Amino acid sequence: MSLALDEAAQDLLFREARTAHTFTDEPVTDEQVRTVYDLVKYAPTAFNQCPLRITLVRSAQARARLVRHMAPGNRAKTAAAPLVAVLSADNEFHEELPRLLPHFPQAKDLIYAERPVREASALLNTALQVAYFIIGVRAAGLAAGPMSGFDAAAVRKEFLDDDHTPLVVLALGRPGPDAFRARGPRLDADEVITTV
Amino acid sequence: MSLALDEAAQDLLFREARTAHTFTDEPVTDEQVRTVYDLVKYAPTAFNQCPLRITLVRSAQARARLVRHMAPGNRAKTAAAPLVAVLSADNEFHEELPRLLPHFPQAKDLIYAERPVREASALLNTALQVAYFIIGVRAAGLAAGPMSGFDAAAVRKEFLDDDHTPLVVLALGRPGPDAFRARGPRLDADEVITTV
């Protein structure tokens, strides 16, 4: 069966795209990040809550502060990538809902009045947006290096506030020497899909 | 700035793709689902854990059991879509890690020995895979209708077991009459991206 998406795009986004572990020195510009965001922002979240927030860690001093909180295996890559972004959930996303969800502005108070409900929902929907963003980085011809191994409480304290939860630290750039590990096997469709 | 991904593919996956609320009767085949899965399975998860599991709710009896547990606003769509899938996290994903992560098989016991650690990590990484799958459904030329409004405990009991957590129920098919609501506004890049 063939997909509507052409083979070259399938390769770019999924089959040939790989998680990079080293990068060249070529900068990643704010314009590139905005272009990626302006594409992937359209992908769906529950009640259009759009909870993803992106912190670009650009200054040398900020980068050093971030590296300290990464798991040891992620430090070299975090230090060396041309750009690193902290992708976090805004647990107070409901404040924007009257504007984002004009056909049901009551969602702010009817559904998301309680903080634990917001935190759980922001976690799920931010993770969706993180994945859209990774696909968008690949759509820009860049490689992404998503990392979840870091001290989340420390990163929150260093760069965010109590209303934001960091989910993923993402290295971005052009792949450098020996950027790719051997790709691990994936589960077969038969192992993942069942029918009832 | 232009992306490496061509404009038609950008439109197909993000700009023109929309969450569908009604569908035609055209069936969605197992082959289509497998083709989508076989593309998006390559997108990254932490330590290649691949925790997403897909339950296709095909029989009329199973569909009726699922509809009962959906939020009222999601019932008609869940009942009428040509195919509905329960997308869940396998909290025992670590059992497959020695095979999926051959360069670091010790991850199974060193990192994921404790169930709460696995549950938190499976939640994040399954959500990433849910988003990849939504993009893949769009790549197949189909519309996706992701829903998080359902009784998760009841859906788990009905279709899964204690080791699996349902995250999203996904309707799939070709858009039917009045399938699309007006698209809500998105946050501007300036509202989402900050630099340190």
Image: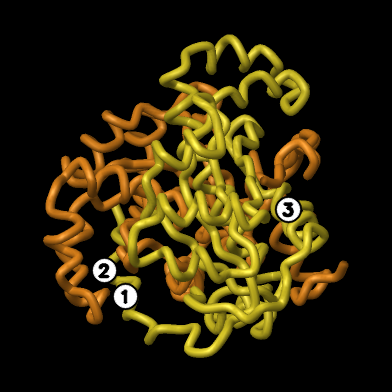
Chain colours: A yellow, B orange
Amino acid at dot 1: Asp
Residue A37's disc number: 3
> Residue A63, percent across and down?
57, 55
Q: CA distance from mark 3 to mark 1?
A: 32 Å
* Chain letter of the residue carrying label 3: A
Per the model, the C-alpha gap separating discs 2 and 1 is 5 Å
Q: Is residue B45 above or below residue B17?
A: below
**Residue appearing at x 35%, y 45% in the figure:** B123
Position of residue A52 measured from the top left corner of the image (x, y, whole percent): 61, 41
Q: Residue beneath label 1, please?
A: A188
Who's the residue at 29% across and 60% down the image?
Answer: A194
Q: Answer yes or no: do the residues labelled 3 and 2 have beta carbons within 8 Å?
A: no
**Which chain letter goes with mark 1?**
A
Query: Which comes sooner in the sequence, label 3 or label 2?
Result: 3
Q: Are marks 2 and 1 on the same chain?
A: yes
Left/right of residue B10 with respect to residue B89 in the rendered view: right
- Mark earlier in primary sequence (3, 1): 3
Image quadrant in which you'd find residue B101? bottom left
Residue B100: where, in percent of width, then height? 26, 74
Which of the image's four quarters has the N terminus of chain A? bottom right
Given the current orientation, which residue lies at the most extreme bottom position?
Answer: A177
Q: Residue pushed farthest right? A: B1
Q: Is residue A132 left or right of residue B36?
A: right
Instruction: Determine if residue B181 is in view.
Output: yes
- Which residue corresponds to the image point at 56% horizontal and 39% vertical from the top-left? A159
Answer few, some or many: residues within 10 Å of disc 1's Cα (few below 14, many 20 plus, some between 14 and 19). few
- Viewer-proximal residue, A159 or B108? A159
B142 or A41: nearer the viewer: A41
Could you say which disc has been placed on residue A191 in the image?
2
Query: Closest to the observer: A30 or A62?
Result: A62
Label pair 2/1, CB-CB below 8 angstroms: yes
Q: Nearer the viewer, mark 3 or mark 1?
A: 3
